[in-house]
Image: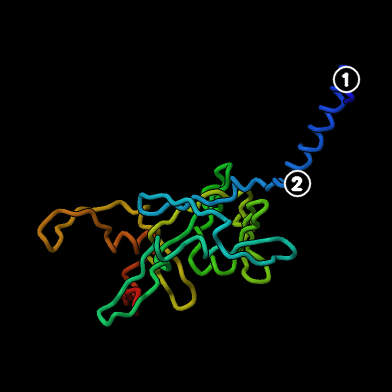
Amino acid sequence: MTVHFFTPFRLFAVFSLLLLIFGCSKEESNPVIPDDSDKYFMVHFDGDSVKVKFKNLPKFDADGEEAIQLNYFIDTSLIHPFIDKNGLSHDTRTLYSYQIVGDDGFSASGNRGYPNNIWEHFFLGHVITASRQVVFPDNKIDLPGAYNVKFARQVFIHRKFDIDFTDSSHFVELRKISPVQVINPQGLPEQAVSLKDVVISILTNPETYNYNMLAVDN
């Protein structure tokens, strides 16, 4: 029987080789996974906040970059549809404005004074998943560049009231109107917004117009 003795140097060399072999094997079985921990939007609505992760939403190719259409971030499980007396469902997401805010707090409305986005915009805009850059392509919609928020992180949803004219349309966010107290049908006091205050926030001569009020199911 032959007994082999290893010098300290040879033992170190063998041990290093084993580490290299097992290390390579471990790396091959555990590939590097891209960090997507920051790939999400926080959506704020009616006092609640929801974390919507990019990985759970449909993707498409936007000029060679992976993107998500913005409407996918606002699901009907968050803003429920209105069911009329005939059982028909009506999308109520059109009743709100949408404020997209970046990591640095920038938004088109907060920093540039533009109106917030409306629901129809979200079918035309998208976010690049790699950079969280919001893009409203010029060939789809004509919006100022401030709406293309960089490093977008949050979406704030605000109830609005539309005021439509024959040649234009405007909206008023109800949070900007001072509430009044009224008595509801149950005989209890309740906060409300005066329709007069909504109108005069847009018009300087409201008495010269006639008004036709429409509901979401009209």
Q: Measuring 35% from the left and 74% from the top, which residue is drawn there?
A: 216
**Residue at the front extreme of this rendering:** 1
Calculate the distance from the C-alpha at mark 1 to the C-alpha at mark 2.
Answer: 33 Å
Regarding mark 2 in the picture, which secondary structure is present there? Answer: helix
Kindly indicate whether the residue at mark 2 contacts the one at mark 1 (C-beta within 8 angstroms). no
Location of residue 100 in the rendering, given as x and y in whole percent from the top left corner: 53, 53
Three-letter amino acid code at the position of disc 2: Glu
Q: Where, by quadrant of the figure, is residue 1 drawn?
A: top right
Q: Measuring 27% from the left and 60% from the top, which residue is drawn there?
A: 194
Q: Measuring 41% from the left and 62% from the top, which residue is drawn there?
A: 96
Tell which of 2 and 44 is nearer to you: 2
Q: Which mark is residue 5?
A: 1
Q: Which mark is residue 61?
A: none
Location of residue 90 in the rendering, given as x and y in whole percent from the top left corner: 37, 75
Location of residue 73 in the rendering, given as x and y in whole percent from the top left corner: 51, 60
Residue 217 placement, left or right of 43: left
Report the mark closest to the observer, 1 or 2: 1
Residue 215 placement, left or right of 74: left
Tell which of 18 and 212 is nearer to you: 18
Q: Where, by quadrant of the figure, is residue 95 drawn?
A: bottom left
For the question of whether residue 202 can be seen, the reply is: no
Regarding mark 1 in the picture, which secondary structure is present there? Answer: loop
For the question of whether residue 64 can be seen, the reply is: yes
Residue 147 placement, left or right of 62: left
